[in-house]
Image: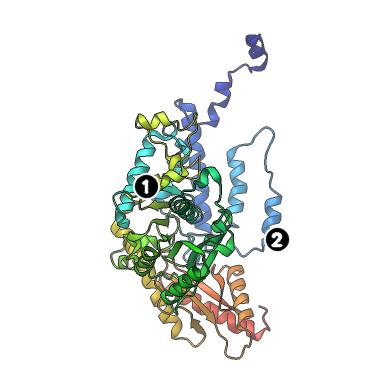
Amino acid sequence: MLSAINKKTLPESTHEDAFDRLFIHEKISGQQAYLQAVDDTKKMIADTIRVMKVPYCGESAASIEEMIRGMRMATEGGEDLQEVLKDVEKMLLHSIQVNHKACIAHLHCPPLIPALAAEMVISAYNQSMDSWDQSSAATYLEEELIQWLCRRLGLESRADGTFTSGGTQSNYMGLLLARDAFCDKHWNWNVQKKGLPPSAGKLRILCSKEAHFTVKKSASQLGLGEEAVIQVETDSSCRLSLTDLEQKLRNLKTENLLPFALVGTCGTTDFGSIDPLNEMADAARTNGLWFHVDAAYGGALLLSKNEFYKLQGIERADSVTADFHKLFYQPISCGAFFLKDKRNFNYLNYHADYLNPEEDEQEGLRHLVNKSVQTTRRFDALKLFMSLRSVGIKQFGEMVDHTIELALQTSKQMQKSSGFTVINPLPELNAIVFRYEHPVVKDNCELNREIHRAMLHSGKAVLAKTVHKGRVCLKFTLLNPRTSIEDIKEMLHEIEELGESLHRNGGHL
């Protein structure tokens, strides 16, 4: 019966032959199809980058949406990849050009060429990092790289970590493990099995007012609620105030509440400010708190000779977040989470007979799913490995140092003009927050909004817009090591010209 069905359903050529051109495999036909697709795609990428002389084409959101809606999302019988790439090229020409020197809005880096090469390997081999039998050699490379990074961070011999999708996941993991460890040690309560304990409503997390929003988001997802997050005031440099931290801890004790975690930020999103990590580690130890350091932005200082000292105290953290798709210049996404004591990963451990059975551990097989909140996971460690080997630590450090020096030069350049007010005149990393101030304009907030919009839609620069103390500000996030002070001077001149033009025309160009 089965053979009869097969004879009716199979085409004249076998399914294997029919599908050969769709996959890369041991036959020459699949390899040739792959090479042709890669050649066509890399030419299209190079062509679009060459013709785009500005960081953004200037089109409105509505016109781009209309263009995309006009594209076919699928075909019934398929079409040549070169035809598909024509639509992809059209889309890319209307995209943000993150490789451009004037794309300086967000913590969104130009990716390194060795990392782009690694992405080809990652996608072609498609290893899944959850179980050993899906990622054999890749498992060991990731673990070796994690241990190398742990040593660079100065973490103890029991340290371990895992690659993540980025800071959101890493911060979530830090607070998840902090909560579960506290409940286990103080109440002998297993959150994995029993859920939240009766007194969970008393649990509190402390962080600065400038900490990343994912601290609150994680508290919400962990069933503690946003109100469990106690925000500590900051000093004039937007760093956590130790005086207010002490006061907040006293208040919590008086209110019979239970602080269990303290989050230090190594590079705030807006200002790049670095909290006093050593002193916070002291406070955490004194008060029995889990100390988590969010170094998603500033973690790259571990490769810098000039700026490494700013990380002092990070080695005392119970857990650390790092993002490699920021100042390590990796394609999105690529992050990591580190633990001072790997035994705390046990709070994540689940065994599935089909994936990571317990007997495999006895045989020495490592299943990295035991260290992650993800199951299926890409081999992102490869792109950082290839970048560190190809570029080298020295040049990595020089790139980071250049961007920090550029931020200082930018601040000095702005302070030469009466048209700019710099909010953080001595940046710790490479972010500058400022306002354009026209001497006769009452509402400079609206003027800064218009400048932000006009710079984008003129294609002159992609800047960020934020709010500080209720006032609209502009921001340069100077991640690109190819950006020079001459590029910055040109952008500042454009901003001043726009500001004057907007003033003359009543807020319209």
For the point 68% across and 47% down, the residue is: 71
Q: Position of residue 176 (x, y in %)?
A: 49, 52
Compare residues 331 and 170 and report the one nearer the observer: 170
Q: Which residue is mark 1?
A: 342
Label number found at residue 254: none
Say which quadrant the C terminus sits in.
Answer: bottom right
The residue depicted at 58 percent of the width and 50 percent of the height is 89
Q: Give the residue drawn at x 67%, y 43%.
A: 73
Residue 62 marker: 2
Label 2 sits on a secondary structure element that is helix
The residue under the point 40% across, 46% down is 381
Picture coordinates of residue 200, whole percent (x, y) = 55, 56
> What amino acid is labelled 2 in the image?
Ala
Locate the N terminus by quadrant.
Answer: top right
Looking at this rendering, what residue extends furthest in the bottom direction?
440
Is 281 on the left-hand or right-hand side of 433? left
Up the image or down, 465 lies above or below 351; here it is below
Is residue 489 placed above or below 4 in the rendered structure?
A: below
> In this orientation, which residue lies closer to the viewer: 171 or 342?
342
